[in-house]
């Protein structure tokens, strides 16, 4: 019986795992989908199986404080521009002007913006790519930048620090975040793969955290979270979350489609092994605020962590 079962597996398996066609997220995969799900991305690009992959789970207790992780300088993040938003079949993306730049934050010089996009779940359920102490947030924003001297992403991907992504997590709030109305309203105009539209007067400062909340972040070396998974990304993940209402978070999985009648949801890659990498953190050593966590850090700082076990 066992042998018969194995024979069955080995005859059936090749047909479902031969990474035919494009890559897809686990949420899209089915035996008839003819696409490679995350565990098979390695067949599309061998880099997806290398040792500095993203996303990762950040274990805050194991992060290392780095006093050189100072604040960022954001250039033109507050300038209002008409931007193009599109559904590329994997996510919703907004193209950004190259005069939007970031520097500081221990980056090597200036990086210019290329685009932003998001990763989400189903109806405000778990959907972020990075997780923090095992918690998966409902959505994650990625603002993608490349080193200023490169002309395009292809060039930047040849440099281990060619790309800088700023990642922001979302959290469900009771009220709508009115700053997100233009972006969320625009989703209805890009429901299908390959469609695009414009958003007049969009400002990045409306989409990210307020200034005082940008000081605390995590830093590590990783990769693109979609094939070809190039290990060229300096990751920055901000600790504070951006509030959106349940309806606003749900809009992404309800209004967008991977393709006709396939709702775009679960657009995240599972977390990848750290393989010995260190995750650094900015700010003081007591940044994980919440009374309970704070007292735990104090106990740990006093070397009494064994009390907790
Ligand atoms: C930045 O570049 C965009 C697109 O090229 C342009 O429309 C905009 O006016 C520029 N903004 C500034 C502040 O120079
Ligand atoms: C871009 O700058 C980096 C250093 O920041 C350098 O290593 C690289 O060779 C430069 N590339 C080009 C194409 O100028
Ligand atoms: C999509 O769904 C609608 C409503 O459920 C249905 O009428 C339509 O035939 C479907 N289209 C395709 C291409 O499956
Ligand atoms: Zn992303």
Image: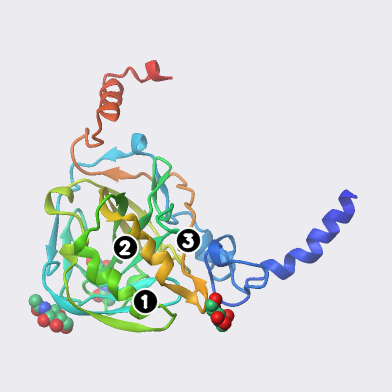
Which of the labelled discs sits on residue 154, or is there none?
1
Relative to 264, is 172 above or below? above
Q: Is residue 82 left or right of residue 52?
A: left
Eye-nearest disc, 1 or 2: 2
Q: Is mark 3 within 8 Å of ligand 4?
A: no
Labels 1 and 2: the sequence-earlier one? 2
Residue 92 coordinates in the image, percent (x, y): 36, 72
Report crowding for label 1: few under 14, some 14 to 19, many 20 or more residues within 10 A (C-alpha). Answer: few
Instruction: Place residue 63 in its image quadrant.
Output: top left
Residue 165 coordinates in the image, percent (x, y): 30, 62
Residue 161 in view (yes/no): no
Q: Is mark 2 within 8 Å of ligand 4?
A: yes
Where disc 2 sits, the SS reads: strand
The residue closer to the viewer here, 109 or 9, is: 9
Labels 3 and 1: the sequence-earlier one? 1
Colouring chosen for the image of the structure: rainbow
Q: Quadrant of the C terminus?
A: top left
Which of the labelled discs sits on residue 142, or is there none?
2
Labels 3 and 2: the sequence-earlier one? 2
Residue 242 coordinates in the image, percent (x, y): 25, 53
What residue sits 40% from the left and 77% below the top? 191
Report crowding for label 3: few under 14, some 14 to 19, many 20 or more residues within 10 A (C-alpha). Answer: many
Eye-nearest disc, 3 or 2: 3
The residue closer to the viewer here, 173 or 109, is: 173
Q: Is residue 111 left or right of residue 235?
A: left
User: According to the image, label 3 marks what residue?
Assistant: 266
Where disc 1 sits, the SS reads: helix
The residue closer to the viewer here, 163 or 2, is: 2
What residue sits 36% from the left and 57% below the top? 139
Residue 234 coordinates in the image, percent (x, y): 31, 58
> Tags 1 and 2 in contact by the CB under 8 Å rule?
no
Residue 124 in view (yes/no): yes
């Amino acid at each position: 019986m066992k042998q018969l079962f194995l024979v069955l597996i080995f005859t059936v398996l090749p047909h479902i795992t031969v990474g035919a066609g494009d890559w897809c997220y686990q949420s899209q995969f089915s035996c008839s989908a003819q696409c490679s799900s995350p565990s098979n991305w390695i067949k599309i690009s061998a880099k997806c199986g290398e040792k500095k992959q993203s996303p990762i789970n950040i274990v805050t207790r194991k992060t290392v404080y780095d006093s050189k992780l100072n604040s960022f300088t954001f250039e033109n993040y507050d300038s209002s521009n008409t931007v193009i938003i599109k559904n590329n079949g994997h996510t919703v993306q907004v193209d950004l002007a190259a005069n939007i730049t970031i520097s500081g934050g221990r980056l090597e010089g200036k990086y210019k913006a290329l685009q932003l996009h998001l990763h989400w779940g189903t109806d405000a359920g778990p959907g972020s790519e990075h997780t923090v102490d095992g918690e998966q947030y409902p959505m994650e924003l990625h603002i993608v930048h490349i080193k200023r001297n490169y002309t395009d992403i292809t060039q930047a991907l040849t440099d281990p620090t060619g790309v800088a992504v700023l990642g922001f997590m979302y959290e469900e709030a009771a009220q709508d975040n009115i700053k997100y109305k233009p972006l969320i309203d625009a989703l209805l105009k890009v429901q299908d793969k390959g469609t695009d539209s414009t958003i007049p007067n969009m400002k990045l400062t409306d989409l990210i955290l307020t200034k005082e909340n940008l000081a605390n972040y995590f830093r590590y070396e990783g990769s693109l979270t979609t094939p070809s998974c190039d290990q060229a990304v300096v990751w920055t993940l901000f600790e504070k979350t951006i509030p959106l209402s349940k309806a606003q978070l749900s809009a992404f999985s309800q209004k967008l489609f991977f393709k006709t009648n396939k709702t775009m949801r679960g657009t995240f890659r599972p977390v990848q092994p750290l393989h010995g990498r260190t995750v650094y953190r900015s700010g003081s050593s007591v940044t994980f605020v919440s009374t309970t966590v704070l007292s735990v850090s104090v106990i740990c700082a006093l070397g009494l962590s064994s009390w907790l076990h």
